[in-house]
Image (cartoon, grey):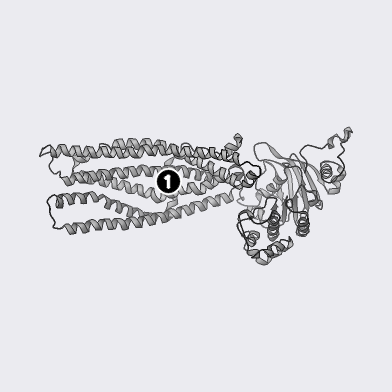
């Protein structure tokens, strides 16, 4: 696989980002649901406060009941203990439900915003970025944010509350023992800082490899038929193994930091408890009455539990930091997409809206998809309303580019394109494209009914018009033979229909929309001769009164066009009727000879005819 293809699947690491700036932007998505989030936060604080009372209950049980062997008030104590944990359960349940409700609402809004952005994004974006990478933005990256909102921000505040509550209670019980308990906290923060620095890099690598893997999978699953046809399975497996192994290594590298950090936190916590026990022993068991005053076995039990509880939220904070880091990396990539400027938009005050007459004019148009690798070079021509024009030329000559530029899927670098005398960049974009209907060689059908594929979401197109359009292109024959007719379900990309049937549906779709301008881009190349004749009859009728642009290699589909434009290497070389171009004995004449003449093409040795030699690559 070439280096260029490898780079196409790659995704750049995001490098350094401003975490707090990104976090503030994420919190803006919480604003519409802040009341619910505030209730969830209150419940979290209450739950954590109740958790902080558990060790004190242990102290009371040991000092007030177990050590003095007293049973009076034991039942009341047990009921209070049970009540605290019952309320803890209720508050925790309500908090979890509310947080997940808020998180799902936020994710719904974010996915909707992303999808809307992608629907309005210019075609050049999809030329540059693989679909699998874009899918990662809408799936894995959004899921990472979901975890942030459901178990990240609120839980962090709750953990902070319980940390301060525990420290406060410990100092209230015995300030000296509390200071001893906190000796290991600096070690814990040092370990946390080490983990933070390395985990961030690991998360970025995992996300990068995940997007690369998704991009590869999307491309090769979509092209599974081609892979099998050319026996390229082994090559695909080897390439997938490389990408998959790279993803595995990125995950393992990240897991390494988890594997070190969590046991290290437990070890530091154990050291802290050991220090507390030793300090208690020195103060109480040494026999010093002044040093051990006020210290009891219950206090020791409470301190041991409080130490365990203190390290748990600190460890949880580290885990939440991992969630935050994953969310920061994911959100940065999402915001790159959301902040990407849409180059092709409607002007603020469009000069033209509504229906067009169908007059098209190219004025000295230059266009390149990349840099100055010009696909069209100084192209100028005019199409009158209702006129049918054919575009002829070898692959890469710029035929389809012309149709894309008219509909403003791309903007020209030089010159201008006029529709009804107005630059297409001055048209309202929605109205501009509503004047066109396009039938492509590679038909795209959506999963759903045949009727909905013809209507394509336009509820103004009723059942009667759908059936009329299908009848006009002779698609009603095979549709009526289906079990549910127009309500028959089409699978993804039209699976279950023949290539010819899919193209018939696409023709019906074009006719149903009643366009002013009809574009046929290699539309009959996959249809047998008999079906093509039936379609040609319908096309002739629907082209009447409409401006039509026909892109085809097969000359039988374009001979009846009023004029033919011949393109070669991005230049307009010839223009005229079929007979006029044959009389010129130029590029079109040679193409015609290649397709229809039984005699070998004679290459003249006359110097005056030197310009008419057959040029490589022009074969139809």
Crowd rating for badge 1 (residues with CA inside 10 Å; few <14, some 14–19, many 20+): few
Residue 290 horizontal side relative to residue 542, left or right: left
Residue wearing tag 1: 24
- Quadrant (top left/top right/bottom left/bottom right) for the C terminus: top right
Query: Measured along the vertical axis of the image, is residue 248 above or below residue 90?
Result: above
Q: Is 252 left or right of 384, judged from the image as shown?
A: left
Q: Locate residue 454, reporting x and y percent.
A: 66, 60
Instruction: Say which residue appears at 38% left-offset and 45% top-offset.
Output: 320
**Given the current orientation, which residue lies at the most extreme right position?**
606
- Viewer-nearest residue: 295 or 78: 78
Picture coordinates of residue 614 (x, y %)? Answer: 82, 37
Tell me where residue 597 sits by quadrant. top right
How far across and down, in percent of the image, does residue 231 sit? Answer: 64, 42
Q: Nearer the viewer, residue 274 or 18?
A: 274
**Quadrant housing residue 100:** bottom left
Please state the total of marks drawn on the protein image.
1
Q: Residue at x 73, y 56 (%)?
A: 357
Tell me the element at label 1.
helix
Residue 151 appears in the picture as rendered? yes
Residue ID at (57%, 42%): 216
- Residue 587 located left or right of residue 415: right
* Between 415 and 154, the one nearer to me in the picture: 154
């Amino acid at each position: 696989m070439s280096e260029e293809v490898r780079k196409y699947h790659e995704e750049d690491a995001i490098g350094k980002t401003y975490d707090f700036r990104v976090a503030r932007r994420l919190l803006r998505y919480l604003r519409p649901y802040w009341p619910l989030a505030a209730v969830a936060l209150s419940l979290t604080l209450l739950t954590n406060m109740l958790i902080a009372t558990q060790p004190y209950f242990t102290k009371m049980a040991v000092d007030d009941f177990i050590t003095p062997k007293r049973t009076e008030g034991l039942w009341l104590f047990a009921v209070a203990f049970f009540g605290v944990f019952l309320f803890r359960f209720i508050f925790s349940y309500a908090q979890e439900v509310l947080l997940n409700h808020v998180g799902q609402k936020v994710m719904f809004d974010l996915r909707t915003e992303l999808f809307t952005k992608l629907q309005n994004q210019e075609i050049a974006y999809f030329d540059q970025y693989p679909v699998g990478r874009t899918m990662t933005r809408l799936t894995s990256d959004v899921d990472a944010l979901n975890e942030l909102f459901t178990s990240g921000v609120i839980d962090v505040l709750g953990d902070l509350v319980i940390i301060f509550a525990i420290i406060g209670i410990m100092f209230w019980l015995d300030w000296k023992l509390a200071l001893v308990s906190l000796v290991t906290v600096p070690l814990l923060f040092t370990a946390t800082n080490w983990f933070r620095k390395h985990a961030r890099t690991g998360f970025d690598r995992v996300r990068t490899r995940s997007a690369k893997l998704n991009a590869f999978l999307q491309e090769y699953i979509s092209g599974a038929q081609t892979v099998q046809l050319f026996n390229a399975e082994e090559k695909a497996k080897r390439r997938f193994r490389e990408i998959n192994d790279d993803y595995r290594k990125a995950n393992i590298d990240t897991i390494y930091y988890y594997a070190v950090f969590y046991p290290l936190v437990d070890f530091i916590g154990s050291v802290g408890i050991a220090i507390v026990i030793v300090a208690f022993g020195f103060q109480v068991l040494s026999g010093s009455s002044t040093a051990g005053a006020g210290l009891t076995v219950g206090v020791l039990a409470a301190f041991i539990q409080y130490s365990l509880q203190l390290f748990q939220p600190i460890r949880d904070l580290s885990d939440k930091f991992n969630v935050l880091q994953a969310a920061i990396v994911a959100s940065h990539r999402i915001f790159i997409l959301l902040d990407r400027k849409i180059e092709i938009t409607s002007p603020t005050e469009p000069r033209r809206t509504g229906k067009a007459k169908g007059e098209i004019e190219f004025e000295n148009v230059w266009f390149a998809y990349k840099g100055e690798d010009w696909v069209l070079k100084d192209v100028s021509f005019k199409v009158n309303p209702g006129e049918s024009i054919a575009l002829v030329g070898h692959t890469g000559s710029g035929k389809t580019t012309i149709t894309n530029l008219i509909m403003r899927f791309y903007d020209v670098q030089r010159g201008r394109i006029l529709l009804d005398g107005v630059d297409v960049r001055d048209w309202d974009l929605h109205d501009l494209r509503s004047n066109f209907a396009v039938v492509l060689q590679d038909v795209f059908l959506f999963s759903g009914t045949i009727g909905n594929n013809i209507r394509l979401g336009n509820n103004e197109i009723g059942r009667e018009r759908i059936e009329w359009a299908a009848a006009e292109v002779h698609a009603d024959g095979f549709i009526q033979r289906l079990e549910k007719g127009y309500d028959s379900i089409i699978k993804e990309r039209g699976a279950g229909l023949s290539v010819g049937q899919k193209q018939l549906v696409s023709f019906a779709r074009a006719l149903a929309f009643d366009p002013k301008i009809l574009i046929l881009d290699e539309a009959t190349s996959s249809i047998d001769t008999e079906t093509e004749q039936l379609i040609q009859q319908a096309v002739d009728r629907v082209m009447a009164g409409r401006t039509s642009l026909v892109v085809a290699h097969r000359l039988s589909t374009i001979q009846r066009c009023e004029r033919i434009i011949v393109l070669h290497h991005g230049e307009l070389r010839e223009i005229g009727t079929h007979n006029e171009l044959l009389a010129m004995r130029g590029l079109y004449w040679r193409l015609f000879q290649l397709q229809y003449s039984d005699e070998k093409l004679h290459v003249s040795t006359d110097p005056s005819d030197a310009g008419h030699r057959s040029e490589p690559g022009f074969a139809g």
